[in-house]
Image: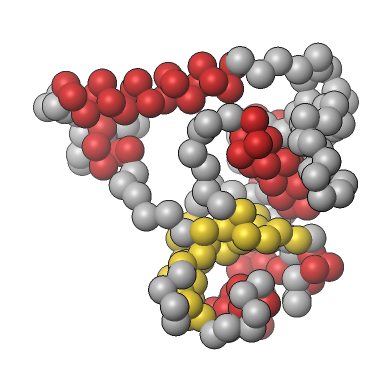
Amino acid sequence: MDYDELNTIHDDRVQTWLNYYNASYGAGGVEKLASRYKDGQHCECLGRINGGFNLCFKVLFHDGVAWAVRFPVPGWVMDPEEKVRREVAVLKFVQEKTQIPVLKLIAYGSASENHDPNIEPFIISEWVDGKPLESLLEKLPRPEWGPVLRDDIDDDIFYKVYSQMADILLELASHDFGRIGSLKIPDADGESTSSPICARPLTRKMNEIQRGGYVVVDGII
């Protein structure tokens, strides 16, 4: 997709958000938000990781507990509130209905539930240390045309990685829904997350179509 003035508008939105974060929120804001959900205990923000759509921060409490605090960045994400709601709903469904190991959700909230609404919604989860798959599978340095599979991968590692991915996909595929769309977050404690599909599907491609072409793909299929 060609780069045009619409992309520039979204880039400006990203930069405005980042500038506000750096000037007015910062590590102190992340620590304040996390402490709220652990009885006001002090924590330290240890650093920032940029993802494709989020900024992620690791916070460490004095008792050794580590959490991840994530903010979807406006301009990268067309509807941060929607992204958080749908992501939390899927996480709850996977926890309730499958044996797939997923991180523990600590808290989530809308912009109005953030102590500074200008930073918009958030998700807080346990911090899980791990090793990126690319460190196991990717041949380095990466060529200009994209990632290449290493040619010296141990067969046992290769089998283990792809077997685990296949198991996850097979278990997810065993759950059938009558329509294509998004799950909703339970409205009350104890309500099943297997409620009917309630909103449009939310995919990377749909986000990028809206970001690059200002075309909102809507509706449940």
- Residue at horizontal 34%, vertical 50%? 130
- Residue at horizontal 78%, vertical 52%? 81
Q: Is residue 122 left or right of residue 113?
A: left
Residue 68 spot, x, y in % from top left? 52, 62
Q: Is residue 200 left or right of residue 148?
A: right
Q: Is residue 35 left or right of residue 158?
A: right
Quarter placement of the N terminus: top right
Query: Does the rendering let one see residue 190?
Result: yes
Q: Is residue 133 left or right of residue 107?
A: left
Residue 27 spot, x, y in % from top left? 54, 79
Residue 54 spot, x, y in % from top left? 58, 54
- Residue at horizontal 83%, vertical 41%? 191
- Residue at horizontal 51%, vertical 80%? 43
User: Viewer-proximal residue, 71 or 124?
Assistant: 124
Q: Is residue 93 above or below residue 7?
A: above
Q: Is residue 108 above or below residue 211?
A: below
User: Viewer-proximal residue, 19 or 101?
Assistant: 101
